[in-house]
Image: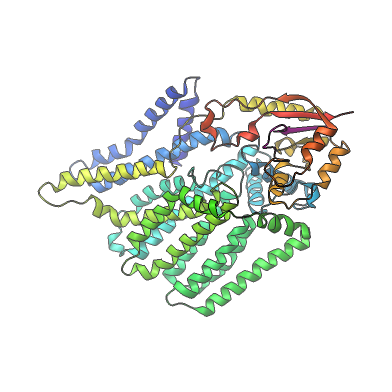
Amino acid sequence: MAGAMLGAALLVAVTAAPRAPETSLVIGVGLLSVLLAVPPAIYVALRWRALDPGVLGLLVLAAGGVGLIAAYLAAVWPYVHFPADVLIWSESDYVNDIIKLRTGYPLYTSQVNNESFTYAPGSQVVTYVLAWLAGSPTSIAAYRVIQLVYTAAAALVATACARQMVLLALPAARFKHPALWAAVWLPFAFLAASNSITDPFVYELHNDALAQLITLVAYWLVLRYVTTNDRRLLVPMVIVPALGFLVKQNLAALLGFYALQVAVFQRPRSFRRAIWLVAAGAALLGLIQILGVLVWGSNWVYWVITVLGSRGVSPLRFVQHIFDAWPYFALGLAGGLVLLRGRAFDRLLGPWLIWMGLLLLAAYSSATAWMLNHMGPGSLIAAVWFMAALVRVWPIAIRARGPRAMLLTWVRTGLAVAMVALASHGLGMNWLPLDTLGADAYRYTAEIQHEVSLGPTDRTLLDVGSWVYLDSGIVMKDRAPSIGERGYSETGDFSGILARINQKGYATILVRGLHSPDFWYDESSWRHSSGIRAALLASYHETGQIRGVQLPLGSLTTGDANPYLLGDVSILVPND
């Protein structure tokens, strides 16, 4: 809450009047610095006769974490508030699924329609229900705010995981100032859950944010089971992988990690429980498949399993992703080095290996492309290990002995705080509190909206972006993300769109990148052309263009929006 309030104040401060970005940044950072100096200053004023360097250092870290959250919220809010679903490739399909839910249209239809999503529908369903309960069922901004709510909830669960881990690793008497540690952990966990390296999409319309929350809940169950060995926990351990599959298909793998903990790492281990767990979990996952086939037929299997399962994994990208995400591998390894000792070794070895397995599996699955977002949940768990390990090393790191012990303790505390603060940048937790989207994006979407309104909406195809169809409840066929995904994996039948183009079934077609090699309908890198570009040029002609967005800070936006989706739009009409 404090981070949200500071973020709002910071956003107002940096956008209240037109000024140079550098000036806005100086004003914002200055305001933030003054506000964040208040908690440590209050502590110094109240306890100046008996200051504890360790406590003051933790207060500074907690205040700094809240400040970084405020900067993050100020930086992403222009994107969260943006009314069009064109920030990343998944947003258009995500909103299209919500249109289907609102109108009762089947979520998965024949592939020749090119209007279904390649993810399971869990995140879309939950997001729509929450937006409806909030009174904003057709608000793109509300959908994005809900993604931030998922992220904040994941940070809360990560904080609970860190506490559970500390209690497993340390005697209770050595865990001092738990409330203060929670104040340090929670901001750090939120920043890890939204880092720019492996979690760049959590405020945009993608399945990542809810998938991360489910993964952290699953990991908390592991830690609770290690602590209590309570067989009643097996029931949610059966259910969570199935819920995970409904949000993001690869989360079904959680069942296998659970089985390893129960059968191999748990003390006492129980093969009987593991067999029951796997059998019940597999049965529930199988039931979901049966229900999917009963409701949507073979279309469920094609969209949810076949398409993504057909993408090839590049060993080179797998290794590259490990190197790209090295800070989070380092966090988890450092946490294991500190905590896996003494009585904690037997208790925490299983959870540590499960974290490593999750992160490596995510690096492998993400090697179908260059993005690292599959690795987000594993990165947040790595941060949990670091957070818990910090409790153990903090008193040792700052304490000094000898004739100048107090002076050295203050110096070492300052160095420890500085090291954590500097590490935050390498972990992708620092965001400039600037509007890197700009007003021209609104001109762009308004011109697209106007062009769609000129003709019959149900016969005006916009390649990417479903916001123009949201209020009218139109499910538009032949969307570019669907075709681009299947053209890349060579799993698509494009006879439907080719027929509609050749028969001039659309009154107007609005597409980006028509003359670019990176044309999502027919990329030059595909081994086999879809034929869509040639069909468009044969049956339609270009009557004009909508100029792409002029971004105010250029390259600073590359992690916030896909430049292709903000590029020039060609306006096509039939030749006759």
Q: Main secondary structure of the magenta part?
A: loop
Q: Which residue is located at x 67 percent, y 51 percent?
A: 125
Q: Toward which corner of the image does residue 396 lie, by quadrant?
A: bottom left
Q: Where in the figure is residue 301, as x and y percent of width and height?
A: 73, 59
Q: Decide whether residue 291 is among the magenta residues.
A: no
Query: Along the line of sight, which residue is nearer the eye, 410 or 250?
Result: 250
Residue drawn at the location 62% of the way across and 59% of the way down: 245
Most extreme residue toward the front is 527
Q: Is residue 456 visible?
A: no
Would residue 246 be found to the left or right of residue 374 on screen?
right
Residue extent of the magenta highlight:
507-519
Q: Is residue 567 above or below residue 411?
A: above
Query: Can residue 61 be spotted in the picture?
Result: yes
The number of numbered badges drawn on the structure is 0
- As rendered, which of 407 and 298 lies closer to the eye? 298
As drawn, which residue projects farthest toward the left?
403
In the rendered view, does 276 fall on the left or right side of 323?
A: right
Quadrant occupied by the C terminus: top right
Question: Of 528 and 519, which appears nearest the observer?
Answer: 528
Left or right, 40 with reference to 458: left
Residue 317, horizontal then vertical, whole percent: 54, 51
Residue 400 position within the rendered picture, expressed as x and y whole percent measured from the top left:
18, 51
